[in-house]
Image (spheres, coloured by chain):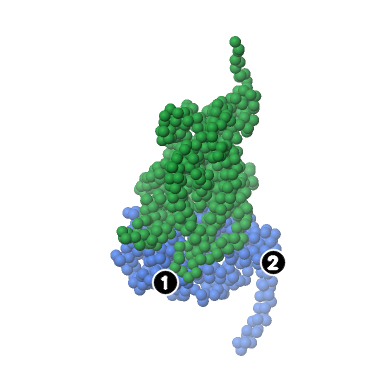
Amino acid sequence: MSTITAPPLASSWPRLRGVRVAEVFVLLFFCLVMALPITFMLAGSFNTAAPGQPWSWGVENWVRAFSDPQTLSSLWMSFLFSVVRLIPSLTLSVIVAWLIARTDMPGGNAIEFLCWFAYFVPDFPLTLAWILLLDPHFGFLNTAAKYLPFVDGPIFNPYSFWGIVWVHLGTGGIWLNVMLLTPVFRRLGASLEEAARVSGANTFTTLWRITFPVLSPMILAIAVLSFIKGLESFNTELLLGLPARIYVYGTRIYDYLRQEPPAYGEATALGSVFLLVLFVLAFFYRSYLQGKKKFTVVTGSGYSTLRVKLGKWRYIALGGIVAWFLIMMVLPLVFLIIGSFMRRYGFFNISSPFTLAHWQNLLGDPLFIGSLKNSLVIASTTAILGILIYSIVGYLLASRKLVAPAALEFFCWLPWVVPGILMSLGLLWIFLATPLRGILYGTVWGIALALTINDSPVSTQAFKSGFMQLGPDLEESARVSGASWSYTYLRILLPLVAPIAVTVGMLNFGSALTSISTPVLLYSAESRPLSILLLEYSFTGEIERAAALGLLITGIICVMMLIGRRFGLRLTGPSREEAKPRGAV
Amino acid sequence: MKTILALLMSIVCAPVACAQSSDWQKQWDETLTAAKKEGKVVVVGSPDPVMRNEIIPRFTRQFGIQVEFLAGRSSQTLGRIRIERSSGLYLIDVYMAGAGSTFYSLHPEKMIDPLKPLLIHPEVTDAAKWKRGKPWFADAEEQYVLVLFSSVESLLMVNADYVKPSEIRSAMDLLKPKWKEKISAEDPKTDSSSGAGMALHWLNELGPDYVRKLYVDQKPTLSKDRRQLIDWLARGNYPICLSCKIEGANELTKEGFKLQEVFDIEGIRNRVTASPFLLTYANKAPHPNAARVFVNWLAGKEALEIYSRENRTATMRTDVDESFLDPRVIPKPGVSYFEAIDAKWIANGRLEAAEKMKEALATR
């Protein structure tokens, strides 16, 4: 009889100690860059003195903010918007991601790429394009509809509740969700699905009972992200909601911040509602995940990514997605491109309506080249930092070995529940208070760090979900074979989540190029990025040049996406041709 | 006789003038040398295409001094500067801000130093060059806040294809049912917008009840985007605009769109503003010499004429060509105007009016 010897306890202790040390470091880092600025802002909301005067404590700012009758009505409106957008956006994105990653639908890779592209088309010019299409007075579609026999008057109106929901569905939400879900679907091993099918389950039952529950951590995380983002949203509502007297919660905060002097106290008080929502959602999210191992899909015992065969439905599915994409993205994008070549955006009835002047002025702007270089440095740094930091955070959260996982999880969400400009103000305060202010303040490095912090929710959740899909036996096998933790992490775990790392890197790269609220308080003349130039053009009504710059930024992101995707797909494993069962990893 | 007297005067005064001239020249040359050593001047203001496309290139070409222009919403930029200053960082030299930021933040929070002593160039110090007989400082001490523009604002704009200006002769005409849902305006509740400034003017002149009827009962369509308002006006969606300005409509009027400013409405005075900015000098400016060169040049004829042409605004200078301006924007002597940067209005009136505005619009 052979004797099985347990691995020496000593070998797991340094591993656990490493996790503890990493946890402490990460918690300290997050305390410094996230909790401290927010605490500072919250404390500031109880300061009732005028700016520049000694602090005086009181609750007047909170009372003023919440006693305004418009506060509650706007919060309700934001809630409605958020829920109404969330349902179709999540449903569609789950279906599209599944079709791309788990079925034999043709053109999946191209569609995934188009989603990436669509996500990074800037919102502001795209919303203007929708106005051009849907405005009840001059909208292209309404004008065209007049020629139909049964139409009497405008049939579309972007300045309405449903108009806003529609525009939101085209600007960001679904595209981002597909981008986040696709790599997770891809990573899903087929063994469970195969087992279900062998047991007689059809495709729908397998999806409903096996695939979606297994992927529920990511789907839930995305739902929470989308819900909070929906509550905060105000840019589109500002342009489309105000004419219809639709006021949302974000607009209330925006109004307080635009006052002279700005009412930071009231704005922070209102922003605290997002913190409360986060507490509640985070509690339920953690309760759902706690103590369950049902999300493991990649183990050491076998791994395959067999795709579901859709038969004739594969062309119908492809047609549906292409139609959706044509309507939601190509149509407004065409108008956006045309707009950038128009002397006056949307005015076709003026003499010589088309011109190259806006592109020439953009490329000839003395600030352009410097801003472009800054943007590329900032975006690349943000992408790399994001992968380095959040892969570790994601691993820690998935490891279930933490002392304070709830605290860490909560910190990771913070940047998205505090209005961007308030978060930037807090970070500015932190940057200036540290001895590193010479390196961080007014430099591309400071902006990159701030943007990295801002990317925490998506990046962390993406990595966490990726690591949760990996079975503990992979790590155990490596340990038993004598591999150190760092070796296991770098050579086994990280390659398995490499597609997610590429996704996170590209997402962070794109967000860094388009973000405005974070760099607006941190840039100097030497570190001005393109997004600030875009802000200046929009602010001064030069929307044609803003459209040109927006398209250019999208083009840069597009090139990076192509490179990143090629790299990512190589790391993903089997391509369509080789999508058949294979052995252990 | 007059000729002899003039000759005698010139003989007597010439050495004094010569000495003064050499005095300022010496000071100017020294300042310029020091400014070039400093290398740059840091200016804060609203995003401004005139500044970006015209002022900065010309100034840099002329003096070899770089201009770092930090553009942003004043509420955001000042928040940032407050934190910088509380951390001991003094990075700004010159502010080009609106009346609200200047009088409610920069001045009371002592973020600015006297600007008057910086003015040394004879083109700026020469009393004859200024409509008020001297450079106009709008603060009580007459030291800090230099007013470079003074222009009459139109009360509204109309698209004459849809509304004849003669149809709006009195303020009450705007309340006629036929204009219901035909009016657009900037949100009057956004304190920092100029649209709100104009709404406060209506309230100050005609009372809260009138403002409620105009901004609530007439159901104007609101926007926070000036470009959107002008485009609506040009297309005739909302042929009366309470917040549009002609500088945003230049291109469209050249194309034949009949967008017209309305200045004369019975029952309400015209408003004179210092738009687009008031000039101030930052406290503890890191580049004092470059700042001095910049403010002297910016207050001079060349720079102000650029602004005047681009923004269709009348300046405070006597030597700036105004032939291309609509004569109605130039304040006329003897006419009673409402002065938007009047000390009393700034100190109390505006804040009280803002409170009344909130009450008047509370029913919305």
As helix, strand or loop, the secondary structure at mark 1 comes to: loop
As helix, strand or loop, the secondary structure at mark 2 comes to: helix
Relative height, residue B55 to residue B81 (above, below): below
Residue located at (40% from left, 44% from top): A88
* Residue type at tag 1: Lys
Residue located at (44% from left, 68% from top): A349
Q: Which residue is mark 1?
A: B258
- Looking at the image, the residue that sits furthest to the front is A312
Q: Which residue is mark 2?
A: B29
Q: Residue B28's image quarter?
A: bottom right
Q: Please give left or right for residue B114 compared with residue B364 in the image.
A: right
Give the Cα distance between marks 1 and 2. Answer: 51 Å
Tell me where residue A556 appears, x and y as whole percent: 58, 52
Chain B in the picture: what colour? Answer: blue
Quadrant where the image shows the N terminus of chain B: bottom right
Residue located at (60% from left, 30% from top): A21
Tell me where residue B209 appears, x and y as whole percent: 32, 60
Q: Is residue A392 visible?
A: no
* Residue type at tag 2: Asp
Could you say which chain is coloured green in the image? A
